Amino acid sequence: MARSKNGGVTMFEIARLAGVSKMTVSRVLSKSALVVPETRKRILKLAEDMGYVPDATSALFHSGRSSIVAALIPEINGSVFPDVLRGL
């Protein structure tokens, strides 16, 4: 059985067992409305039975959103910048 880096079941494995593409599994797991109800049920049942757990890092990468804030400051020891960073 294919395993992710953290040892869990992958979407590829669910797709293979369900007889669908990885994109179809992805659509089901992201709650897209573009999947036939019977296929959706089958994939969700397989994912549950196999103990599928979404990879949070991968999900952030694919969504394009990370909730990470970056700040470029000229010097960390300045009088204003530590307060600005604490505010972030």
Image (cartoon, rainbow, N blue to C red):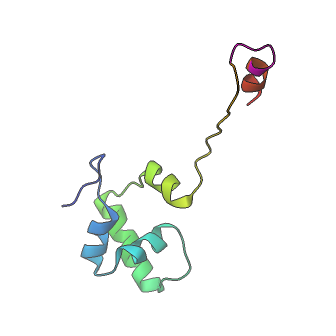
Residue occupying the far right of the picture: 80
Q: How many marks?
A: 0
- The x and y percentages for residue 45 are 36, 70
Is 18 magenta? The answer is no
- Tell whether 45 sits left or right of 62: left
In the image, residue 21 above or below residue 85: below
- Residue located 31% across and 63% down the image: 49
Write down the quadrant of residue 14 in the picture: bottom left
- The x and y percentages for residue 62 are 50, 60
Write down the quadrant of residue 43 in the picture: bottom left
In the image, residue 9 above or below residue 5: below
- Residue located 26% across and 48% down the image: 7
In the image, residue 78 above or below residue 88: above
Write down the quadrant of residue 54 in the picture: bottom left
The quadrant the C terminus occupies is top right
For the residue pair 38 and 5, the one nearer the viewer reads as: 5
For the residue pair 64 and 50, the one nearer the viewer reads as: 64
For the residue pair 16 and 36, the one nearer the viewer reads as: 16
- The x and y percentages for residue 2 are 22, 60
- Tell whether 58 sits left or right of 11: right
- Residue located 31% across and 46% down the image: 6
- Residue located 81% across and 18% down the image: 80
In the image, residue 32 above or below residue 49: below
- Tell whether 62 sits left or right of 72: left
- Tell whether 6 sits left or right of 79: left
Q: What residue span does the magenta drawing correspond to?
A: 76-81
- The x and y percentages for residue 74 are 70, 25
The quadrant the N terminus occupies is bottom left
